[in-house]
Image: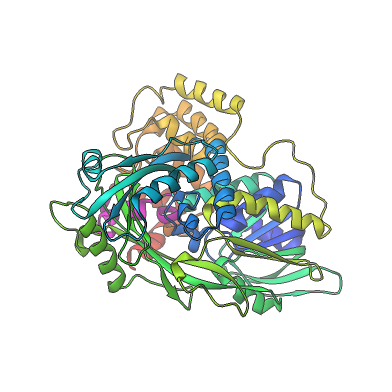
């Protein structure tokens, strides 16, 4: 909380080149890209960072093979290019994964066309992943006995990528990168009004939702990256735009691990949408739905659960059908889809793409970001820098990339020290990976101070919360550097424990209250009670 309070004080007193409202994926990459170029950046979010849409993705980094069906080849090409760049730049975090897609006899797409399509998709991906394969129904059964092939006419296997950790963690690491380069960021700070004054500055009235205080933030340029709330915020500030959002609700259910192999099982659901069973640590994440909704605030309904469970039970040969009692956790969020005002959505709502649009008002020095998806995040960061530069903010040329894992020298230094401390001598039973790899993947160069702590006290490598992989050396760093305001911030976004452990089991995990004490000190009991009394 100390870092957050210091940043709020700076928000009150400093004048910024750019104020970014919304700390989801779009806002985080904008902050990181602009701060790396020397801009004085402020970033605020009314919730926690990645506290809305960006915490509810499929955790997939994919080039959008489904958009080939609607002939959006340019979009697929750009998304595949972005996927490849994320694979190169975040090799510890973004990894290639195989998709085994089964085609039923009712599927509208012929098997031969699907196979050709995967090869075209591979070429769009510049051949940077493993080549596609075609399987008969019997071969699919041999590859993955879990799949029900009674109604199958074969299928294909191809590659895309996914996040080793959760989506919100990935977003926060961009926020952390921005702060390392001078960005002043604070969560739980809401923009309640804003105006463009006679001195050519945006003045945003912000409210600290924790302390209750209101204050002004001044900046030359405002970026509205509020995701599903972009239109609402533009209405508050009086900014007229050509584009707007419509919303689609998507849900996932997290259940005990289904398949043993780490691959994504893909099917066509009853409504024609691609439907997945995705590895999530020692669990499986199944879904998704695609339901038009009017409001971005959504929840999982009984109908949603029935749809997902019935689809997965029909497509897998499970010893016992999945029931609602098997659900460990649920993920529910909206996808903001972009339309021009006055334009009707496509007749087939499922075919609408997740493209992004950057709309700039030069007169008011204001930028709105509509739509977007995780895979496309680097492109958003680059486009925003171009637009901000056009609005008169001087940006420095880059000496190195503004994104990606630390360079070879830092990585080599880290692993040499980790080896000397014995961190990569054996695989941890609770995570299935070496501790050195876990710390590097999650914290990068910020794991180096953790090695200092381990060197002073070897017990810092011991588990803090049983069975979760979390070590004692991590928790104090998280407290001091990751702006944890509520226990949910930690359990749901900086980690993914809330998704992997059922609510009642989580409450009883050994070490959970001790972690709360590390994070919140004398407020631990209140924070613990607030979370577990929901």
Q: Position of residue 291 (x, y in %)?
A: 40, 71
Name the residue at 22% across, 48% down.
147
Q: Is residue 354 visible?
A: yes
* Residue 450 position (above or below residue 161): above
Q: Position of residue 329 (x, y in %)?
A: 31, 59
Q: Position of residue 58 (x, y in %)?
A: 42, 54
Magenta stretch prevailing secondary structure? helix
Quick check: 523 left or right of 341? left
Name the residue at 29% across, 33% down.
429
- Quadrant containing the C terminus in the rendered view: bottom left
Q: Position of residue 245 (x, y in %)?
A: 57, 72
- Quadrant containing the N terminus in the rendered view: bottom right
User: In the depicted view, which residue is nearer to us: 60 or 388?
Assistant: 60
Quick check: 36 left or right of 111? right
Name the residue at 54% across, 53% down.
483
* Residue 120 position (above or below residue 360): above
Name the residue at 60% across, 63% down.
22
User: In the depicted view, which residue is nearer to us: 501 or 354?
Assistant: 354
Give, as a single range, the part of the protein colored magenta.
489-509
Quick check: 519 left or right of 400? left
């Amino acid at each position: 909380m100390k870092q957050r309070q210091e940043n709020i004080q700076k928000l009150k007193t400093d004048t910024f080149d750019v104020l970014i409202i919304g700390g989801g994926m779009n806002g985080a990459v904008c902050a990181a890209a602009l701060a790396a170029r020397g801009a004085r950046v402020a970033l605020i979010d009314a919730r926690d960072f990645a506290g809305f849409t960006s915490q509810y993705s499929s955790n997939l980094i994919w080039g959008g093979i489904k958009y080939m069906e609607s002939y959006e080849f340019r979009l697929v090409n750009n998304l595949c290019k972005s996927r490849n760049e994320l694979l190169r730049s975040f090799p510890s975090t973004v990894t290639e994964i195989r998709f085994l897609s089964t085609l039923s006899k009712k599927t509208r797409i012929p098997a031969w066309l699907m196979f050709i399509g995967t090869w075209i998709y591979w070429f769009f991906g510049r051949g940077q992943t493993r080549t596609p394969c075609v399987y008969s129904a019997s071969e699919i059964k041999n590859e993955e006995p879990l799949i029900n092939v009674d109604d199958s006419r074969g299928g294909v296997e191809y590659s895309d990528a996914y996040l080793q950790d959760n989506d919100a963690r990935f977003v926060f690491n961009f926020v952390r990168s921005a702060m390392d380069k001078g960005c002043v960021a604070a969560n739980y700070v809401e923009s309640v009004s804003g105006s463009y004054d006679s001195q050519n500055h945006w003045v945003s009235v912000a409210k600290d939702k924790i302390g209750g205080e209101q204050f002004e933030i001044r900046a030359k340029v405002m970026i509205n990256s509020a995701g599903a709330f972009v239109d609402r915020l533009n209405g508050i500030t009086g900014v007229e735009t050509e584009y707007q959002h419509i919303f689609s609700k998507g849900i996932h259910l997290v259940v005990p691990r289904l398949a043993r192999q780490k691959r994504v099982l893909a099917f066509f659901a009853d409504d024609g949408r691609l439907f997945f069973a995705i590895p999530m640590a020692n669990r499986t994440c199944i879904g998704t739905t695609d339901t038009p909704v009017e409001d971005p605030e959504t929840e999982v309904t009984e109908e949603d659960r029935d749809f997902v469970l019935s689809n997965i039970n029909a497509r897998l040969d499970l010893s016992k059908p999945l029931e609602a009692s098997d659900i460990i956790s649920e993920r529910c969020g909206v996808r903001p889809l972009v339309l021009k005002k006055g334009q009707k959505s496509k007749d087939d709502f499922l075919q609408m793409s997740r493209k992004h649009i950057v709309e700039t008002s030069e007169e008011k020095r204001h930028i709105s970001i509509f739509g977007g998806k995780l895979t496309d995040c680097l492109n958003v960061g680059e486009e925003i820098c171009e637009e901000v530069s056009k609005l008169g903010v001087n940006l420095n040329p880059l000496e190195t990339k503004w994104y990606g894992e630390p360079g070879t020298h830092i990585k080599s230094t880290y692993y040499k020290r980790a080896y000397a401390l014995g961190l990569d001598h054996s695989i941890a039973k609770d995570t299935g990976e070496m501790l050195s790899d876990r710390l590097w993947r999650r914290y990068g160069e910020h794991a180096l101070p953790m090695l200092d702590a381990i060197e002073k006290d070897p017990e810092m490598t011991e588990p803090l919360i049983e069975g979760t992989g979390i070590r004692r050396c991590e928790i104090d760093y998280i407290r001091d550097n990751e702006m944890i305001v509520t226990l949910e911030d930690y359990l749901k976004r900086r980690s993914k424990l809330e998704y992997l452990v059922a609510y009642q089991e989580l409450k009883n995990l050994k070490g959970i209250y001790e972690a709360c004490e590390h994070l919140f000190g004398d407020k631990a009991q209140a924070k613990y009670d607030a979370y577990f009394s929901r």
